[in-house]
Amino acid sequence: MKIKLLQKMQQLPPLLWHNQLKLIISRNLNPTKHPMEVHHHSHHPKSWKEYVQEFLMLFFAVFLGFMAEYYLEYRAERHKEHDYLVSMKEDLKADLVEMKIKDSRMEEMVRASNKLNEVIFKPAWNEADIDSIYLNSLIMVSRVYNIDFSSGTIDQLRNAGGFRLIQNEQIVRKISEYEKGKITMKVQLEQLMDRGANVHRIQNSLLETTVFSTKETIGKVVYDKVKLAQIKKQTGSAFLTSNKFVFHEYANITGTMSGYISYYMIMSKMQQQQAKDLIKLLEQELEH
């Protein structure tokens, strides 16, 4: 290989050949090293302090991440709690309005029952007494007295496990007491409605119920005195029976219903006080 290289060099012009020869000799006499660029890694063993430092850095990174997530979850739950408390307060206010409306209707029914007892036990009835029996009988069966409690918030709390979000134990206890009161009132209402059904049945055997008619307003029932006069003229009586004992039974049944209504009203008053106390607690909590 070297001989061939020399032969090729001899074929070059003398000056160029001389320069190439000097370059070859110079490289052989003074070789230069061109080391490859490599990355040098330190392989000395780590001290225990470095291990501790790395562990602490990793630990605090995980811990701070956990704390950030916990704080975000905590804030979200506090917002939910606030929304539940505001919604509960609005439901309680609606319940108070509902109970007061129904109380006024129940008071009207109690007065009607008392008037029926007063008139029915008279020895004889005049036209005003007959009108009184019909008008007060109408009141006994046409007034809506069942209290329709708001249940939106409490249903959400039950279904979504929201009770755990309310931190104030006194509020949780008051809500529980309020709900127990509603259950007790529901039982009383069922018994009251049974007595109301009895009143309906005996009215159908005593009164000319066709003289009662409804108007355009929902729940509005009126007594047609003119129609009753026509019936009386045709049949000779304003009632389906002249048996006073049946009327006495009617008075007793309406009196029993009046007692159930009165007790239902007492429960309503107690429930209203619980609602007011709970609203006060909720407002205090929301101010914090």
Image (cartoon, rainbow, N blue to C red):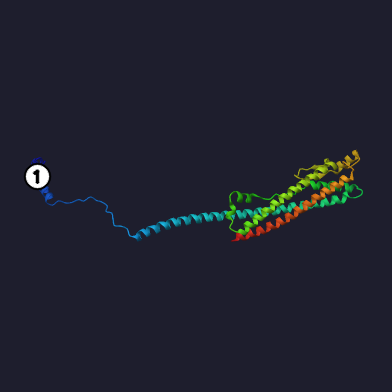
Q: Seen in the image, is 25 located left or right of residue 48?
A: left
Q: Count neighbours of disc 1 (C-alpha within 10 A) and say few if under 14, some if 14 to 19, many if 20 or more.
A: some
Residue 124 x %, y %: 92, 48
Residue 192 x %, y %: 76, 48
Residue 174 x %, y %: 65, 57
Q: In this picture, is 102 found above or below 10?
A: below
Observer-nearest of 51 and 148: 51
Residue 122 x %, y %: 90, 50
SS at badge 1: helix
At x 80%, y 45%, the residue is 198
Q: Quadrant of the C terminus?
A: bottom right
At x 62%, y 55%, the residue is 86
Q: Quadrant of the N terminus?
A: top left
Q: Seen in the image, is 252 located left or right of residue 55?
A: right
Q: Amino acid at mark 1?
A: Trp
At x 60%, y 61%, the residue is 287
Q: Seen in the image, is 208 located left or right of residue 189?
A: right
Q: In this picture, is 225 found above or below 175?
A: above
Q: Which residue in the rendered view is the most extreme toward the top?
A: 234
Q: In this picture, is 215 found above or below 106?
A: above
Observer-nearest of 68 and 56: 56
Residue with the mark numbered 1: 17
Observer-nearest of 19 and 163: 163
Counting labels gives 1
